[in-house]
Structures are given as C-alpha cells and as structure tokens.
Image (cartoon, helix red, strand yellow):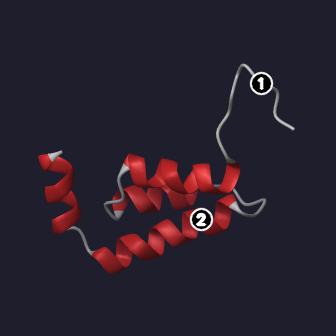
Amino acid sequence: MERTQRARAERDAAACGSAVTAVREAAASEANVLPPLREALRAGATIGELCGVLREAWGMHDAVRPHP
C-alpha cells in the first residue's frame, strides 16, 4: 500500500486523470481499449484504478449466473 500511495503522490495527476478518462471513453464505445490502457499505465494509473473504470463501463462477469 505504501508503494501505491507513493506512486500516486509522485505521478502527474493531470496527465493520469486525462489518460484514465481516455480509457473510460474507449470502454464506453467500440474503440480498442488497449492503446489508452497502455497510456494510462505510462501516466501512472494503477491497475486497480483501471479495473474500476472497466467495471463501471462493462460490469463484472459472474461465471455462475448468465449475463442478461
């Protein structure tokens, strides 16, 4: 947790926020999400932050219940 907090403190918050927004926009469209994901990682976004964005856009898979 300390490494994550340090990484968040040391990153360029504006660049990271912009990159995460690009991921959110790509996930909401038919666009390929891999290029914006790579850029967000380069900007210092965490895997958890990006997974949260993708969960917001696509929901969570449940192998027990079929998706409606």
Snapshot quadrant of residue 68:
top right
Q: Can you tell which quarter of the image residue 62 is in?
A: top right
Circle 1 Cα neighbour tier, 10 Å, few/some/many (<14 / 14–19 / ≥20):
few
What residue is disc 2 on?
24
Q: Check the picture and name the quadrant holding the N terminus.
A: top left
At numbered mark 1, what does the secondary structure look like: helix, strand or loop?
A: loop
Circle nearer the viewer, 1 or 2: 1
Disc on the earlier residue, 1 or 2: 2
x, y percent for residue 60: 64, 39
Q: Secondary structure at mark 2?
A: helix
Place of residue 5 in the rendered image (x, y in percent of width and height, measured from the top left):
18, 56
Q: Is residue 43 above or below residue 55?
A: below
Q: Residue 4 in the image: state x and y as whole percent.
A: 21, 51
Residue 14 spot, x, y in % from top left = 35, 80
Q: Is residue 59 left or right of residue 20?
A: right
Residue at 30% across, 75% down: 13
The disc labelled 2 sits on which kind of residue?
Answer: Arg
As measured in the structure, the alpha-carbon distance from the residue carrying label 1 to the one carrying label 2 is 26 Å
Q: Please name the residue that numbered disc 1 is placed on.
A: 65
